Image (cartoon, helix red, strand yellow):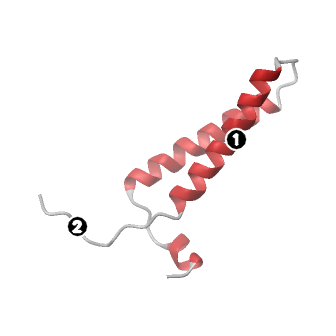
């Protein structure tokens, strides 16, 4: 399975939730970085880390695919 097929394949529910959380983290970090008021350096650094963590979580969770088998309970 190449990368294009992997990204087009359906994503399991857990990883869709992780992707959404990652997007929220990235948006929050971007808002902190783009803030028009002066913020302490630690807050700016934390905003940068939020952007990176959110972006990585979203990208990794998007590439996850299910095995195609349903669990029998």
Is disc 2 in contact with disc 1, using a CB cutoff of under 8 Å? no
Q: Residue furthest left?
A: 73
Q: Secondary structure at mark 2?
A: loop
Residue 67 locus on image (x, y percent): 33, 71
Residue underneath mark 1? 51
Residue 70: which quarter of the image?
bottom left
Instruction: Count the marks.
Output: 2
Q: CA distance from mark 2 to mark 1?
A: 35 Å
Q: Secondary structure at mark 1?
A: helix
Residue 27: which quarter of the image?
top right
Residue 60 locus on image (x, y percent): 55, 58
Q: Is residue 28 above or below residue 36?
A: below
Q: Is residue 73 above or below residue 10?
A: above
> Which label was assigned to residue 17?
none
User: Horizontally, is 16 left or right of 70 in the view?
Assistant: right
Front-most of residues 34 and 45 = 45
Instruction: Give the crowd class for mark 2: few <14, some 14-19, many >=20 residues within 10 Å.
Output: few
Residue 68: which quarter of the image?
bottom left
User: Horizontally, is 54 left or right of 39 in the view?
Assistant: left
Residue 32 locus on image (x, y percent): 76, 28
Residue 12 locus on image (x, y percent): 39, 59
Residue underneath mark 2? 70
Residue plotted at (39% across, 51% down): 14
- Assign the C terminus to one quadrant of the image: bottom left
């Amino acid at each position: 399975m190449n990368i294009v097929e992997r990204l087009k394949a359906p994503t399991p529910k857990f990883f869709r939730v992780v992707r959404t959380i990652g997007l929220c983290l990235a948006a929050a970090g971007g808002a902190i970085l783009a803030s028009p008021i002066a913020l302490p350096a630690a807050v700016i650094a934390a905003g940068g880390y939020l952007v990176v963590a959110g972006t990585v979580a979203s990208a990794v969770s998007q590439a996850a695919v299910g095995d195609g088998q349903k669990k029998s309970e």
